[in-house]
Image: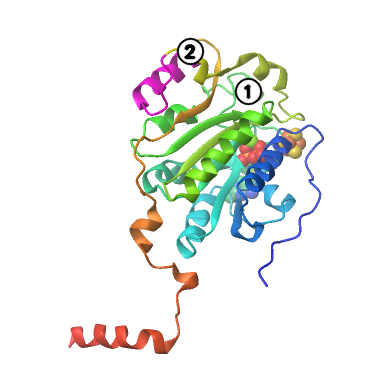
Amino acid sequence: MVQSAKPVPPTWCPGCGDFGVLAAVKRAAADLKIPTHELVLVGGIGCSGSIHNFLEINGIHALHGRLLAQAVGVKLANPSLTVVAAGGDGDGYAIGMGHFMHAFKKNASILYLVMNNETYGLTKGQASPTSQIGFEGNVEPPFHSILTALSIPAPNFIARTFSGDPKGMTAILGEALRFNREGRGFAFIEDLSPCVTYNDTYKLWREKVLDVSKLPGYDPTDRKTMFRLCLETTEQGRIPIGVMHRPKEPGHDGLEVKLVGDRPGPVRTDIGLAANLPAYEKLLSGLS
Ligand SMILES: Cc1ncc(C[n+]2csc(CCOP(=O)(O)OP(=O)(O)O)c2C)c(N)n1
Ligand code: SF4
Ligand SMILES: [Mg+2]
């Protein structure tokens, strides 16, 4: 019998924005009727990265900043799984930055969910790559994941959500998971998820978030327009949220399609001697 892992109660501080993400993942997966044992969540290192422990699914606690490599590996091994990588802004945009950039290019059909609280929550509130100038002595301008994502010319699904808007978040998460399950490639969602203990931004973010779909000229199939809208709203001191890129092309561009093709993936492949001996002998005869 195929089984999912048993969840434990969340260990997060009461009010942590990550609770909103947990609820949205549960709702979106239920709406899409994804069997729990077919949903795999690869968690990063950080408060956010423990999310898989609180869900009745199968999960892996990855190395810090290496969750994308592991999530892509799971998808390649068994393309029939729905795979979500979930972690923090420190995990994804500091130690994991190299993997972050290449994930858009590789375009495997997995969802990368970053819970951005503009701090290293688990290690007690130090500045992270998305921290504002002045936070805990930070002197660097914050990293903008959406502008970076939009600058990479690959047919990815790109969005930003806010834990203070659970309905909007659930809808976008559902769309991203559908995109993955149709084998259309990589989906990236940055959720603005306040850390109530070390950087309580709920009130500020509620005032600043701006749903880009309400702006004149909004067109998520047009990368240039969306880059301009995001840049302009950010320069005006607002925080753009919503779907930022929804590729026009219906194609199958995922990495597993390129590498695994029509085969079922190593997990479902017969690796026994009898099934593979003829191919092995053919290979050897070609070498003589
Ligand atoms: C290789 C390595 N370096 C550093 C750490 C220490 N460390 C644990 S979590 C973390 C950052 C957590 O911040 P973030 O990814 O934003 O997650 P959050 O706790 O805010 O959800 C760091 C630096 C580690 N566990 N492993
Ligand atoms: S320290 Fe911050 S990020 Fe971590 S559980 Fe508490 S509120 Fe959430
Ligand atoms: Mg963080």
Here the colouring is: rainbow
User: Per the image, is 241 magenta?
Assistant: no
Q: Which residues fall within the magenta stretch?
A: 217-234
Picture disc at residue 235: 2
Q: Quadrant of ligand 2?
A: top right
Question: The C terminus appears in which quarter of the rendering?
Answer: bottom left
**Label 1 CA crowd tier, 10 Å (few <14, some 14–19, many 20+):** few
Q: Position of residue 151 (x, y in %)?
A: 37, 30
The reply to whether residue 93 is visible in this rendering is no
Residue at the image position 28 percent from the left and 88 percent from the top: 281
Q: Position of residue 245 (x, y in %)?
A: 43, 31
- Where does label 1 land, which residue? 137
Q: Quadrant of residue 36?
A: bottom right
Q: Secondary structure at mark 2?
A: helix
Q: Position of residue 146 (x, y in %)?
A: 47, 29
Q: Quadrant of residue 1?
A: bottom right
Instruction: Judge left or right: residue 63 versus residue 99.
Output: right
**Label 2 CA crowd tier, 10 Å (few <14, some 14–19, many 20+):** few
Nearer the viewer's eye, disc 1 or disc 2? 2
Q: CA distance from mark 1 to mark 2?
A: 22 Å
User: Per the image, is 231 magenta?
Assistant: yes
Picture disc at residue 179: none
Which residue type carries mark 2? Answer: Glu
Choose the circle earlier in sequence order: 1 or 2. Answer: 1
Instruction: Judge left or right: residue 200 versus residue 288.
Output: right
